[in-house]
């Protein structure tokens, strides 16, 4: 979720038929709860991890071969079905405690982080909006949070008129 901005339900229900590798990145085809379709690229930092996950735990999906159905879940539970959102939230809570983090670690926070990373990389708001599956730029603005340190560093690079004096 941190490398795709997927909603928790979208990540839990991701199927083999919805993933495709390209030269640059894995692309996830998502249909949201309202029936809207969008394509979501996996951030470069996640490509190697995703390929390793597939080759180690889901080898048939790694090469997109021997899949009896495009409906096989990419992240199946032990019965082959999708994980429940509550289970994933529980894992993140355990991870937060293990890491000693004081702030909550939630799937939605990971989605917000993804939006912020895209914004700081200069991706246009309309593109971030499309990737996240938002209908309104106002919603996207709520998701993206400018890192004040990053803004301060960028501002420091802007020459001031009195610097030339």
Image: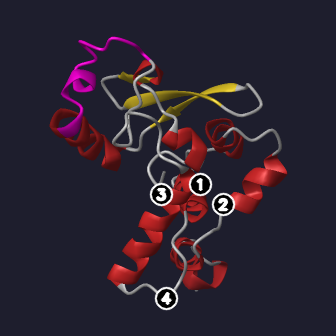
Q: From mark 1 to mark 2, how far is it between C-alphas?
A: 5 Å
Seen in the picture, residue 120 relative to 79 is either above or below; the reply is: below
Mark linked to residue 115: 1
Callout 2 secondary element = loop
Q: From mark 4 to mark 2, how far is it between C-alphas?
A: 21 Å
- The magenta stretch spans which residues? 57-70
Q: Residue furthest front?
A: 79
Discs 3/4, front? 3
Check the picture and name the quadrant holding the C terminus: bottom right
Q: Which residue is mark 2?
A: 144
Q: Which residue is mark 3?
A: 88
Q: Which residue is mark 4?
A: 102
Mark closest to the chain's N terminus, 4 or 2: 4
Callout 4 secondary element = loop
- Residues under numbered marks 1 and 2 in contact, where contact means CB atoms less than 8 Å apart: yes
Callout 1 secondary element = helix
């Amino acid at each position: 979720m941190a490398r795709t901005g997927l909603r928790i339900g979208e990540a839990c229900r991701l199927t083999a038929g919805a993933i495709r590798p390209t030269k640059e990145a894995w692309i996830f085809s998502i249909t949201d709860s309202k029936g809207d379709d969008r394509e979501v690229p996996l951030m470069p930092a996640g490509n190697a991890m995703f390929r390793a996950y597939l080759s180690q735990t889901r080898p048939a999906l790694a090469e997109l071969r021997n899949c009896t159905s495009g409906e096989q879940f990419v992240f199946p539970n032990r019965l082959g079905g999708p994980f429940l959102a509550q289970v994933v939230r529980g894992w993140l809570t355990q991870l937060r405690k293990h890491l000693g983090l004081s702030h909550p670690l939630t799937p939605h926070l990971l989605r917000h982080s993804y939006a912020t990373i895209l914004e700081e990389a200069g991706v246009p708001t309309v593109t971030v909006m499309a990737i996240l599956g938002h209908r309104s730029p106002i919603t996207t603005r709520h998701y993206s949070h400018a890192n004040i340190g990053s803004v301060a560093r960028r501002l420091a690079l802007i020459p001031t008129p009195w610097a030339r004096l």
